[in-house]
Image (cartoon, helix red, strand yellow):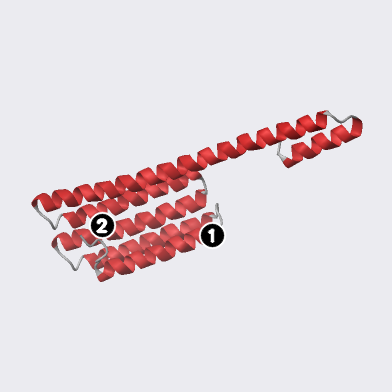
Amino acid sequence: MNRFNAHPVSRALIALCGAFVLAAGAQAAGDKTVYDQHKAEAKTTYEAAKKQCDSQSGNAKDICQAEAKAARKKTEATAEADYKGTPKARYDAAEDIASANYDVAKERCDDKTGNDKDVCVKEAKAVRDTAKADAKAQRDTKKARNEAAEDKNKAAYKVEAEKCDAMTGDAKTACTNQAKAKYHQ
């Protein structure tokens, strides 16, 4: 099954969505104006793409509409993740994008019949579930890395503090203050 043999309108939507995603990623987290701009552009692009889908019929129209919705959802999810700048927002965006891709793949499966359709749907679900699992693993890995870094930092501080205990007076105070500053304690 060739998933990348998209309709010319679809390819244009994908390219435009990619441009929005890259532009959104280049902006600083928390810029509400940029976030609102990307959402408005996503809506405008979606409406134009949806109008182009009206000239088609049957499942080709359904696929076109699903691709337009997916492009909008991907742009909006990426913009929101960039705006919020949190691991949860990035995870939610990855899940939304996986679901949008699944919706398009499922529409493509409607052109098939029998076992071919069943296999196609199972493949689409597997790709979606894999993307969601990868997003979860990445989120959990980042959390584990942060916790590990925090634990290492505390352990290193305790070593420095112990070294400072061997000192007295101003030297001990300076050593302790330096260790606290170095390890953010």
The quarter of the displayed image where residue 59 is located: bottom left
Is 116 left, or right, of 18 in this rendering?
left
Crowd tier of the residue under label 2, counting other residues whose Cα lies within 10 Å: few below 14, some 14–19, many 20 or above? many
Q: Residue at x 31, y 56 (%)?
A: 70
User: What amino acid is found at the position of numbered circle 1 in the picture?
Assistant: Gln
**Badge 1: residue crowd in 10 Å (few <14, some 14–19, many ≥20):** some
Q: Residue at x 75, y 35 (%)?
A: 160
On the image, numbered disc 1 is attached to which residue? 27
Answer yes or no: do the residues labelled 2 and 1 have beta carbons within 8 Å? no
Residue 46: image quadrant is bottom left
Q: Report the quarter where the N terminus lies.
A: bottom left
Disc on the earlier residue, 2 or 1? 1
Q: Residue furthest left?
A: 114
Residue at the image position 25 percent from the left and 61 percent from the top:
3
Give the residue number, with chain letter if any, for mark 2.
Answer: 66
Residue at horizontal 23 percent and vertical 65 percent from the top: 53
The picture places residue 121, in percent across and down from the top left corner, at 19, 49
Residue 7, disc: none
Is residue 132 depicted above or below 156 in this figure?
below
Mark-to-mark CA distance, 2 and 1: 28 Å
Where disc 2 sits, the SS reads helix
Q: Secondary structure at mark 1?
A: loop
Q: Nearer the viewer, residue 182 or 77?
A: 182
Left or right for 164, reference 45: right
Q: Looking at the figure, which quarter contains the C terminus?
A: top right
The x, y position of residue 29, in whole percent, is 55, 53
